[in-house]
Image (cartoon, rainbow, N blue to C red):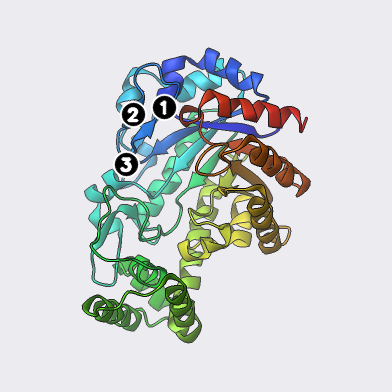
Amino acid sequence: MSYKAIYTYAWDLAETGVVAAADEFRALGLDTVTMAGSYHAGKFMRPHGKAGKVYFPDDGTVYFRADPSRYGAIKPVASQLVGERDMMQELVDASGMAVNAWLVLLHNTRLGIANPDAVVRNAFGDPYHYSLCPSAPQARAYAVGLARDVTETYPVSGITLESPGFAPYAHGFHHEFALMKSNAWLENRLGLCFCNHCIAGAEKAGIDARRLKAETAADIEAYLDSDIDYPADMAEAFWRADVAADGDLRRFIDFRSGVVTSLVGEIRSAVRKDANVAVIPSVARPTAGAWYEGSDLAALAGSAGIIEACFYEPDAMRVKADLFDISRRLKGAGKLRGILRPSHPDLSSKREFLAAVAALREGGVDELAFYNWGHLRRANLAWIGEALRGTS
């Protein structure tokens, strides 16, 4: 079976019913349901929701029946919905479609607050509770356990891994606020993790991580004490110059990529052998920015087998450009899937959406997913059907 997937949440499926939802999906030409098996917090507008239009999911919980014995110190917390219905089981039993489990791994505020020794920490030691650190052994054990658990408990066709790496500074927490302009230089410096686990691992790799931490803190401190606001283009140039000039910073970034690649490799080794493993490499736009999060596209494709890239762009030409660049970076490693959003803020016209699907297909991407059933208006969902009829 091919991968023509719709991303969705357990609460939307529970409200509509698996059989009715699957009938709707098949009518659009879809053959796979990619359901969130673990997820962070949110405030979601549901255009065709029946039991209310705005939904707040349980923060940092799982949406399948997890087995605590498969985890170490950090164990998953079940959502309230799981106590009532096992939507993952209902999907595999009654949908008649392939089921793919979408796992948000390390972006988890609930678990970060409960496990402060396993979170990302900046150069000042401030904890980022929304981001478990992929260098922390207990966080790695949790991520591996999550992937192994869902593939051993359910006959899912595969898993899609989101947030296996280092989240950028500006992504992930409730009500982020500052009374000053931000910029790429400041955010990239603030986003570097200098937790004890990262420092120990970097020093083992021959990097003077303590010097780098101290200099990063001093640079940020000096900027915050100044009356300067870096313009966007200058900030980007300053950051790239820092990476080029500071050998330890370059090696530290390479070290981060090794951490993430090895974690994904551990997951691939731990899950059921016949289950596909795909990685969403980045929240960055374009996808090439994934390097900052520790996502080496070719290395991840080699470790997992599949890159599932978010082509979250406003027009088809930008989608085509991103595809060209990703393909250049992969150099033939693994398989490439594409995720599109047929709506604002991305492809807000049917013409651009259909052109984007065509561009991916012409570029060799024949496995597609669409985000997200509960968020999309029915008119936008209809575009998916039109696109897939045009590619059959």
Residue in the foreground of this view, choosing between 165 and 265: 165
Nearest-to-viewer mark from 2 and 3? 2
Image quadrant in which you'd find residue 52? top left
Quarter occupied by residue 53: top left
Whole-percent x and y of residue 76?
Answer: 33, 39
Q: Element type at marker 3?
A: loop
Q: State how far apart marks 2 and 1 are (Cα).
A: 7 Å
Residue 169 position, x and y percent, is 35, 61
Label 3, on which residue?
75
> Residue 27 appears in which quarter of the rendering?
top right
Please state which amino acid type lies under the numbered disc 1. Answer: Arg
Q: Disc 1 vs disc 3: which is toward the camera?
A: 1
Residue 112: give x, y in percent of width and height.
28, 50
**Label 1 sits on residue:** 46
Residue 146 in the image: above or below residue 286 = above
Q: Is residue 30 above or below residue 227?
A: above
Question: Nearer the N terminus, badge 2 or badge 1?
Answer: 1
User: Residue 58: horizontal and vertical position, in percent?
Assistant: 30, 33
Q: Residue at x 76, y 47 (%)?
A: 364
Residue 159 vertical placement versus 167 (above, below) = above
Q: Residue at x 24, y 55 (%)?
A: 116
